[in-house]
Image (cartoon, rainbow, N blue to C red):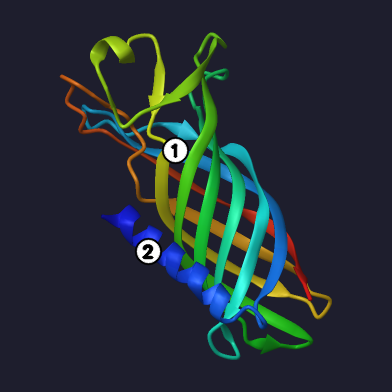
Amino acid sequence: MKSNVLLIALFTTVFAIGAKAQSTTFGARAGFGLQNINGQYDDDHKYDNKMKFGINLGFNAEIPVTEEVYIQPGLLFATKGAKDKTYRKAKISLSYLEIPINLLFKPELGDGKLLLGFGPYLAFAVGGSYTNANGDKAQFKFAHKVTQSEYAGSAYVRRMDFGVNFLAGYELSSKLSFQLNAGLGLANIATKVEGFNNSGKTKNTGFGISAGYRFK
């Protein structure tokens, strides 16, 4: 249901861009930050992970709603994951194509503009790997549900992720901007296994900093 709402928001944004094409601006953005995977195992014990370095880069549009309020859809390539606190070599690495749709508030402040925004994101995993405590690496397979025989000896996660974004920053008069970003995953990306408890939760989280440029 939540993913359907995000898809409706995406299509609504596309139509809005068409309706206000003359006043819509486009920009590029790139950044880095710290990512983590939070949640709990089937026995209710919480994950004990530490953060992992991640990057994001892509493009966005700004569609004016009022003089200071905009809808900001985008398309990003983002890397996420986590490291194990106990075993130095163990880590999860995931790569996503992410579609954020933010509501952006841009009041004038000095010679530039303040940036405050939030909104949902929808993401699709395009790759990833799991490295165990011995340093052995396995490529993730993507599935919503698998059998026990499929799960044995393989690494699985769900392909789709969704959640909410928050941002705060400043855009200079030169159209160069800097902002703090935070993402809170709402989707359980753990693949279900037939015959297992499947009560565990696995969710992406992260924060970072990025720089962007708005084309005139």
Q: Quadrant of residue 9?
A: bottom left
The answer to whether the residues at label 2 and label 1 have Cβ atoms under 8 Å apart is no
Q: Which of the two marks, 2 or 1, is nearer to us in this view?
A: 2
Q: Quadrant of residue 211?
A: bottom right
| Image quarter (top left, top right, bottom left or bottom right) of the N terminus | bottom left
Query: Quadrant location of residue 95?
Result: top right
What x and y, as percent, mark residue 132? Answer: 49, 14
Question: Which of the two discs, 2 and 1, labels the residue nearer the N terminus?
Answer: 2
Amino acid type at mark 1 = Ile
Question: Percent from the top left, x then y, of residue 213?
Answer: 77, 66
- Residue 90 screen position, x and y as percent: 52, 20
Q: Nearer the viewer, residue 14 or 143?
A: 14
Q: Quadrant of the C terminus?
A: bottom right
Please give the residue where the numbered disc 1 appears in the rendered image: 37
- The answer to whether residue 44 is seen in the rendering is yes
x and y percent of residue 14 in the render?
51, 68
Residue type for callout 2: Ile
Report the label total: 2
Of the pair 66 and 130, the residue shown nearer to us: 66
Q: CA distance from mark 2 to mark 1?
A: 27 Å
Q: Is residue 104 visible?
A: no
Query: 84 left or right of 106?
Result: left
Q: Which residue lies most toward the right here? A: 174
Considering the numbered disc 2 on the image, is that residue within a helix, a strand or a loop?
helix
Residue 8 is tagged as: 2
- The image shows residue 190, relative to residue 174, as above or below, that is above
Residue drawn at x 53%, y 72% is 117
